[in-house]
């Protein structure tokens, strides 16, 4: 990651570690709702490329009643550029995980899975009231976590998105 002084204001605002850490935390919380053991670290690297990409986020279903694999089959455009986004956002995700972990909002289990921890300082409801876009992105991050949990093993999810760890 570039030094903060070198980041454009747009990048600094949209990819700041607090916001991105919150999104990963929401995905971990959603994942744990299905598989309590926690979000495998490799899957955390796929959360931001899905939820921060506007067209992909807008196309996401309302619930996990629509499974990941059929959804991707019906929307091949979601795969266009995904590998590049995943690669570009991997350092952002790692920075976000470190940031959220240092503030007690994410924790690693003994086997390297991510679990939500602690509470948000201002409270989730108060922050979500600020923006509909923010609310939609946070909600979709939780959905993606559940979706990944229901989709199978991390290798299966990576294969569905046509990327490799």
Image (tube, rainbow, N blue to C red):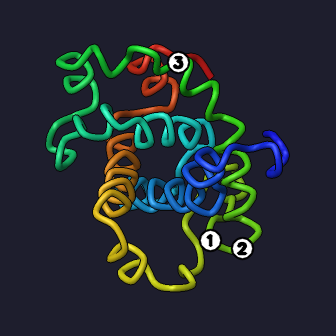
Q: CA distance from mark 2 to mark 1?
A: 6 Å
| Residue 47 sits above or below residue 12 on the image | above
Quarter where residue 59 is shown: top left
Residue at image location 55% in from the left, 50% down from the top? 14
Tell me the quarter of the image containing the C terminus. Answer: top right
Q: Is residue 75 left or right of residue 46?
A: left
| Residue 56 sits above or below residue 65 on the image | above
Which residue corresponds to mark 2? 103
| Residue 78 sits above or below residue 96 on the image | above
Quarter where residue 65 is shown: top left
Residue 22, percent from left and from top: 53, 62
Q: Is residue 105 left or right of residue 155?
A: right
Which residue corresponds to mark 3? 83
SS of the residue under disc 2: loop
157 or 135, which is in the foreground?
135
Residue 88, percent from left and from top: 64, 28
Residue at image location 18% in from the left, 49% down from the top? 63
Indicate which label's residue lies in the foreground, 3 or 1.
Answer: 3
Q: CA distance from mark 3 to mark 1?
A: 28 Å
SS of the residue under disc 1: loop
Which residue corresponds to mark 1? 105
Q: Residues within 10 Å of mark 1 (few under 14, many from 20)?
A: many
Q: Are marks 3 and 1 in contact (CB under 8 Å)?
A: no
Which numbered disc flags the more N-terminal residue, 3 or 1? 3
Residue at image location 48% in from the left, 23% down from the top? 158
Quarter where residue 107 is shown: bottom right
Q: Are marks 2 and 1 in contact (CB under 8 Å)?
A: yes
Q: Residues within 10 Å of mark 2 (few under 14, many from 20)?
A: some
Q: CA distance from mark 2 to mark 3?
A: 30 Å
Residue 30, percent from left and from top: 39, 58
SS of the residue under disc 3: helix
């Amino acid at each position: 990651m570039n030094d903060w002084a070198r980041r454009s204001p747009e990048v600094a605002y949209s990819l700041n570690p607090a916001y991105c850490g919150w999104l990963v935390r929401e995905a971990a919380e959603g994942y744990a709702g299905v598989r309590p053991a926690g979000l495998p670290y490799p899957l955390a690297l796929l959360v931001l490329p899905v939820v921060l990409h506007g067209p992909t986020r807008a196309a996401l279903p309302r619930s996990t009643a629509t499974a990941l694999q059929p959804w991707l089959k019906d929307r091949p455009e979601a795969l266009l550029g995904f590998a590049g986004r995943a690669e570009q956002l991997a350092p952002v995700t790692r920075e976000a995980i470190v940031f959220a972990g240092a503030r007690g909002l994410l924790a690693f289990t003994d086997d390297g899975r991510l679990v939500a921890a602690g509470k948000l300082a201002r409270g989730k409801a108060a922050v979500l009231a600020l923006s509909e876009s923010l609310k939609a992105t946070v909600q979709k991050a939780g959905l993606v976590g559940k979706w990944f949990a229901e989709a199978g093993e991390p290798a299966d999810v990576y294969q569905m998105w046509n990327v490799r760890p």
